[in-house]
Amino acid sequence: MASHSPATTGFQNVCREIHGACDEPRRMSRLLAHWSPSERQQIKVAYRAMFGEDLVARLQKTVTDDQDNELCNLLYLWMLDPAERDAIMARDAIESARTDYRVLVEIFTRRKQEQLFFTKQAYLARFKKNLEHDLVTEPSHPYQRLLVALATSHKSHHDEPSQHIAKCDARRLYDEKNASGTGLVDEATVLEMFSKRSIPQLRMAFCSYKHIYGHDFTKTLKKNLCGEFEESLRVVVKCIYSPSKYYCKLLQRSMQPPRTNKRLVTRAILGGDDVGVDEIKLAFKNNFGRNLEDFIHESLPQSDYRDFLWMWQGGQ
């Protein structure tokens, strides 16, 4: 057998187990669910070094052979590089009968500022199309205008967040809304701000808004006063301001009776991967007053899919 680098030797045993379980989704889920993103990348490197085979390609074949098995799809996406995964999810969202803008919002508001750049590169390489161009439709949708603004911001801002700018932006949001007399936000102001600020800078602005005015910015976007733009903006702001809260609520909603929406669960797990499972668990406890592990056990019947969720949230 070929020699292995120190980075791969620590994963040799698990790679052997994975190699023997590639056609058994339940075993695979128990082997893969609890690893961090960086550990999963190391496992892929070690697997290729040991067996001369791409683990993701092997998992993709399993998905092709069993297209109705959401667990197989989850395992495949789970082991992809984040940019590749987001590119595939973006394409699926755009090609659905009605564009799933919420999936795109989640992708465009990832925590790491450079993530969207790599996602757009992966999208171009895989689909030979430009992600931003694929977003543009006529007539334009408010989500689309917000996403284009966020994409513009990602091109130019790499500075550390500024508390001074955050306070100025918070006051501007407040003043513009109150000056309108309609209860609606000024769309031009919001789009300009989104196009000039990084995700961390926007998050700081929404934190400043709550500190200054005593309530979340989303509370000002009351449903009874909302237009279509405000409703879209609420979702984007929630995803930026508190992603752990956003994804824990997505998880909770996806597992409501009478039937679990596994595609929504998959989306919550993959999005939560960017936030961190510990933050998701804490947010779930704070929002619903119960442990995520208990909720999973009570909401899902015994299945391979539940086994993955159990291992993902820290079960043994």
Image: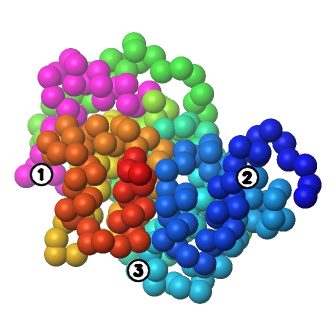
Q: Marks 3 and 1: in contact by CB < 8 Å?
A: no
Residue 296 falls left or right of residue 78: left
Q: Real-space Cα distance between discs 3 and 2?
A: 43 Å
Can residue 101 be seen in this snapshot? no
Can residue 71 be seen in this snapshot? yes
What mark, if any, has residue 12 been given in the picture?
2
In terms of secondary structure, where does tag 1 sit? helix
Residue 55 location, quadrant: bottom right
Residue sticking out furthest to the right: 2
In terms of secondary structure, where does tag 3 sit? loop
Q: In this rendering, is residue 88 above or below 152?
A: below
- In the image, 171 versus 78, the foreground residue is 78
Q: Main secondary structure of the magenta part?
A: helix
- Tell me the residue at 51%/84% (across/down): 67
Amino acid type shown at disc 3: Ala
Residue that mark 3 sits on: 97
Q: Real-space Cα distance between discs 1 and 2?
A: 54 Å
Q: Earlier in the sequence, mark 1 or mark 2?
A: 2
Q: Position of residue 89 (x, y in %)?
A: 51, 64
Q: Marks 2 and 1: in contact by CB < 8 Å?
A: no
- Tell me the residue at 62%/50% (across/down): 40
